[in-house]
Amino acid sequence: MPRRRSDRPGDPLALILKALAFSAHKHRDQRRKDPQASPYINHPIGLANVLRNEGGIRDEAVICAALLHDTVEDTETTPEELQREFGLRICRIVLEVTDDQRLPKQERKRLQIEHAPHLSRRAKLVKLADKICNLRDVANSPPARWDLERRRQYFEWAKQVVDGLRGVHARLERTFDEVYSQRPHP
Ligand code: ZN
């Protein structure tokens, strides 16, 4: 099979834009749970922005995996499709941060805490950025139906996950701690 242009090394922007276009297409009918029902793609873009512009991450595999991180979990995207389009390296990172949707929600949340210390360095970065973005969203524009206790519990759970991956990126961990310090108090 002929290699696509964006598969060539040395053109990270091409691969990043391909991941962004792919993800935007896959999430095109989805909305966030915030009161404004923002387009879902804002969330993966937020992760990539945090990683590059707050964490200084230049590794395009991490940026692409951030853009794609919810495609397998939340759309009909298959691992085979990701591997074909973006290669095994990026596919693996996405699968590392993908919950098993066949399990009940509480079990999935427990497994995120349990798995965090065992993730690869790149997957830890994506997971850390995901928690930073999610806590910011819950702090700034929480889902309409989430009462204070639910928001508080979400902060505590996110901190447990992040505590399991510490040591991966000091600056982004400090960023997480700053966001966590704004947690709602009962
Ligand atoms: Zn996410």
Image: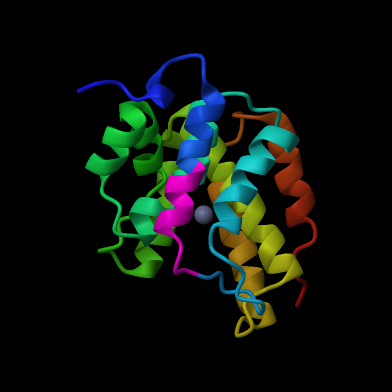
Q: Quadrant of the C terminus?
A: bottom right
In depth, the one of 107 and 62 nearer the eye is 62
| Residue 116 percent location from the top left of the image | 46, 42
Residue 31 sits above or below residue 145 on the image: above
Let me know if residue 21 is in the magenta part: yes
| Residue 29 percent location from the top left of the image | 44, 69
Q: Does residue 9 appear left or right of residue 100 in this picture? A: right
Range covered by the magenta-colored residues: 20-30
Residue 94: image quadrant is: top left
Q: Who's the residue at 65% across and 37% down the image?
A: 51
Most common secondary structure along the magenta stretch: helix
Residue 7: image quadrant is: top left
Q: Does residue 50 appear left or right of residue 12 in this picture? A: right
Q: Who's the residue at 57% across and 74% down the image?
A: 33
Q: Who's the residue at 44% across and 60% down the image?
A: 27
Residue 5 sits above or below residue 93 on the image: above
Q: Who's the residue at 41% across and 34% down the image?
A: 118
Residue 41: image quadrant is: bottom right
